[in-house]
Image (cartoon, rainbow, N blue to C red):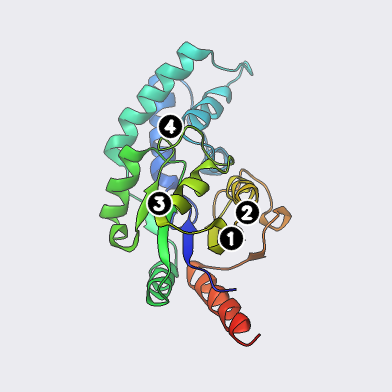
């Protein structure tokens, strides 16, 4: 199979952003006189966008209560205020990301980021980490009406890149990526090092598990070679 485009998740796939997210979440909790949460707990809350993240962070309380709409809105505003100053501060590229993106580019594939992160944080983060120039399109959590695990963001990215979903390869770290890609009819790979809401990546419905973005580029190249020999 010769792929024409690769669609990559951001948090937990290209970039390890959890330290900045956790710092903003705990700053929000401190402002509400709530105790800080450990990194592992906060990591398990990442995946379905900022509002869902904040709701889960606020739901971790001694009373076991779920925040109402007003509390969620206030918490979200506070979280975003802190995250604006922290975005990218402690974020790191995962090993193999640059090598993989270069390999995909050299192979002539179009590339897009498809993330549930809000646009105001995504573009500055890509620029700050030196990744923006790799991508022909960026689809964020507030680009489309619905976020992953809905297929809409992946399908929108395919339209922007002018490729058929069947000719695209998606790479992510979570059940949200796997479900969205499957629903869109896109081949999907998973990396094992990201934020999968505490779910074992081996349980995901994906075509394969790869150890890095560099490994994903080799996987795609191998599929091309197999296709060329048929």
Determine whether label 1 and label 2 are within 8 Å by CB: yes
Q: Secondary structure at mark 2?
A: loop
Would residue 16 be seen by someone viewing this image from the given angle? no
Determine whether label 4 and label 3 are within 8 Å by CB: no
Is 210 displayed left or right of 157 in the figure? right
User: Of discs 2 and 4, which sits in the foreground?
Assistant: 2
Query: Foreground residue, 15 or 38?
Result: 15
- Picture coordinates of residue 130 (x, y %)? 28, 60
Q: Which residue is mark 3?
A: 160
Task: Give how far apart the Cα atoms at labels 1 and 4 are.
Answer: 41 Å
Task: Give how far apart the Cα atoms at labels 1 and 2 are.
Answer: 6 Å
The circle on residue 185 is 2
Q: Secondary structure at mark 4?
A: helix
User: Of discs 4 and 3, which sits in the foreground?
Assistant: 3
Task: Give how far apart the Cα atoms at labels 4 and 3 are.
Answer: 37 Å
Q: Which residue is mark 4?
A: 26
Q: Which residue is mark 1?
A: 166
Mark closest to the chain's N terminus, 4 or 3: 4
- Residue found 44% across the figure and 25% down from its top: 29
- Residue found 56% across the figure and 28% down from its top: 56
User: Of discs 1 and 4, which sits in the foreground?
Assistant: 1
């Amino acid at each position: 199979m010769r792929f024409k485009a690769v669609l990559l998740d951001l948090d937990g796939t290209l970039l390890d952003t959890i330290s900045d997210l956790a710092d903003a979440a705990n700053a929000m909790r401190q402002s509400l006189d709530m105790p800080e949460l450990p990194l592992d707990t906060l990591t398990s809350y990442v995946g379905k966008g900022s509002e869902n993240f904040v709701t889960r962070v606020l739901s971790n309380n001694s009373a076991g209560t779920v925040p109402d709409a007003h509390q969620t809105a206030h918490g979200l505003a506070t979280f975003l205020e802190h995250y604006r100053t922290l975005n990218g501060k402690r974020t790191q590229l995962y090993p193999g990301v640059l090598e993989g993106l270069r390999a995909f580019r050299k192979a002539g594939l179009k590339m897009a980021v498809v993330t549930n992160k809000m646009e105001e944080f995504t573009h500055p983060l890509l620029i700050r980490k030196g990744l923006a120039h790799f991508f022909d399109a960026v689809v964020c959590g507030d680009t489309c009406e619905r976020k992953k695990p809905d297929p809409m963001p992946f399908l929108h990215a395919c339209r922007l890149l002018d490729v058929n979903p069947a000719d695209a390869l998606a790479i992510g770290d979570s059940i949200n990526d796997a479900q969205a890609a499957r629903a869109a009819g896109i081949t999907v790979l998973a990396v094992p090092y990201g934020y999968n809401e505490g779910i074992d990546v081996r349980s995901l419905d994906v075509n394969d598990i790869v150890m890095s973005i560099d490994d994903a580029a080799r996987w795609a190249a191998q599929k091309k070679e197999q296709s060329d020999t048929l």
